[in-house]
Amino acid sequence: MIEIERKFLVTSEDFKSRSHKHTRIIQGFLNTDPERTVRVRLKGNKGYLTVKGLSSDDGLSRFEWEKEISKTDAEALLQLCEKGVIDKVRYDIKVGQHVFEVDVFSADNEGLIIAEVELTEEDEVFQKPEWLGQEVTGDQRYYNSQLSQYPFKSWV
């Protein structure tokens, strides 16, 4: 249940033409404490409840537990969430042996595009597509829980 991922800014929308799937995601947070973030997510017609633990010092890994719940339950729990809902479209793009998840944010985070790749080991080698920009792994400003409280539009 340890999640290992790296995050990057995205420099262009070239990834869209290579995407094999995209899904709208709406998510809120019941708790944004970094030691135990609790997220409610609507992903298409499915709901999810996720608990994430404290990130490692380098931001590469942390405990993650996720359970699928009904869409109705997710919609009800979203009403209990802290202020600041995340609205984004996620694009899945296969690059080499990995799948990059690229999130195009809207609403208060419009203009932000982040790519994530999940790894099985922290030092795992992976192919980097040309649209991948600066790495932001470990930069807490780019955590969804932080973006819900301090949206991208407020940075400028």
Image (tube, grey):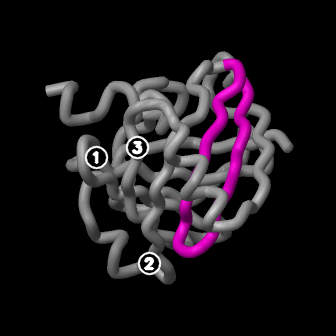
Callout 2: few (<14), some (14-19), or many (20+) C-alpha neighbours within 10 Å?
some
Callout 1: few (<14), some (14-19), or many (20+) C-alpha neighbours within 10 Å?
some
Where are the magenta residues, as a range? Answer: 35-53
Looking at the image, is mark 3 or mark 1 nearer the viewer? 3
| Residue at the image position 40 percent from the left and 46 percent from the top | 86
Screen quadrant of the C terminus: top left
For residue 30, above or below residue 109:
above
Query: Circle 3 sits in a helix, a strand or a loop, which is it?
Result: loop
Left or right of 25 on screen, residue 53: right
- Extreme residue in the left direction: 156
| Residue at the image position 43 percent from the left and 67 percent from the top | 24
The residue identified by callout 3 is 85
Q: Is residue 44 visible?
A: yes
Q: Which mark is residue 112?
A: 1
Q: Is residue 147 visible?
A: no
The residue identified by callout 2 is 19
| Residue at the image position 63 percent from the left and 70 percent from the top | 46
Left or right of 30 on screen, residue 88: left
Does residue 93 show up magenta in the picture?
no
Question: What percent of the width, then of the height, locates residue 96?
Answer: 60, 71
Disc with the residue nearer the chain's start (2 vs 1): 2
| Residue at the image position 79 percent from the left and 50 percent from the top | 120
